Image: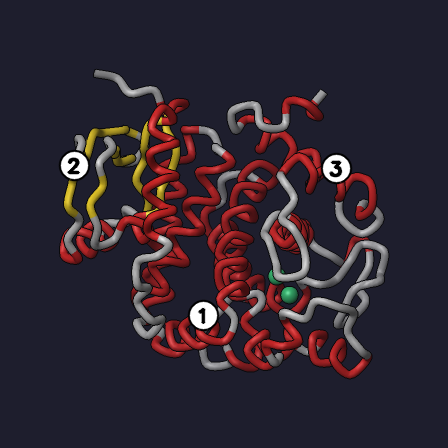
Amino acid sequence: MTIDRANLQALKLSEIRNSMTEFDLYLDLGGEIVPYANGPHCWSPDETEQLLQNGQFVLLYNRADADRVRHYLASRVDAPEKPHTDASHILADGISEFVKTLYAVRFPQEHYGLVKSLTLALDKFLQAYPQLSDLCLRLVQHDPYTFYHSARVAGYSVALGLALRGADEARLWDMAMGSFLHDLGNLSVPREILNHAGSLNDAEWDQIRQHPEEGLKLLEDVPLTRMVRDIIFYHHERLDGGGYPRRLRGSLISPELRIVSFADVYTALTVPRSYQKARTSVEAIQFIEDHLLKFLDPKILHAMRRLLTVEGGQLSQIAG
Ligand SMILES: [Fe+2]
Ligand SMILES: [Fe+2]
């Protein structure tokens, strides 16, 4: 039986860990969709672990089951959360957030293999350096928003990088890793400032502006490429020269940096915070178009619109 990918939605493996699901689930094996669980399925920690080790960070379900899945996830909210004390689970969560973001924009099927090997390489690298997993764990404990935000920025950066810069795995890996780590320096910013609802005073802004440099300092001993370091240090530079820390402008900001900056802003607009409602993708695209194009690259906005439009016509009302 052929399964139509257009009818499937992604669900993070971490969301169903140690529980019972009652809807059909599928796996994506290098672009081939295969049935995995039919009807009631009891998830054991071993099974989940094995899937994670095989690079399966998400499962797919039928759109027709969307209501049942929503119901199931809502009931899981009350389940006791495992405290964030296990670095390998945190990393797996971050990676699955990355993959889920990529699935949400539906890049062309011909790139599934590339994205799979990129995901495995990213995971392997994060696991290989204890300082890295330790820093990710500390970040989740300090400010979970920043950690999951970064994983999503990595997903959008790879999707945009593929669309605009081609299927160069080394470059995409740099963009993914740079994005994954771009806000690590938030570890040095008190969480009250990170989650502050009103306007910040000058001293608080100064602390925020330090986070790119602080991030690099934390990663001094990890062998990262120049591009990864640049993404961490320069991700708040803006085309009009109004960014920080170096007030770079125009052509001094590389295409990869522009992509990550765009993904960073788009992600921040579409996630709810204590002080703002999440915008839908349509509202976020419109907001960027109306207010932010003097410092974000319009070419990237167009690419993002195309990527989101591919996603079940989500943006058809403004795609024109
Ligand atoms: Fe940042
Ligand atoms: Fe960010």
Q: Do the CB atoms of the residues marked 2 and 1 lie less than 8 Å apart? A: no
Say which amino acid is labelled 2: Pro
Mark 2 or mark 1, which has the lower sequence index? Answer: 2
Question: How far is mark 1 from mark 3, CA to CA?
Answer: 31 Å
In this rendering, the answer to whether 120 lies above or below 3 is below
Cβ of disc 3 within 8 Å of ligand 2?
no
State the residue at coordinates (54%, 65%): 146
Element type at marker 3? helix
Q: Is mark 1 within 8 Å of ligand 2?
A: no
Q: Nearer the viewer, mark 3 or mark 2?
A: 2
- Where the N terminus falls, by quadrant? top left
- Return the residue at label 2: 40
- Amino acid of disc 3: Gln
Q: Earlier in the sequence, mark 1 or mark 3?
A: 1
Is disc 1 placed on a helix, strand or loop?
helix
Q: Name the residue furthest top.
A: 1
According to the picture, the residue beneath numbered tag 3 turns out to be 286
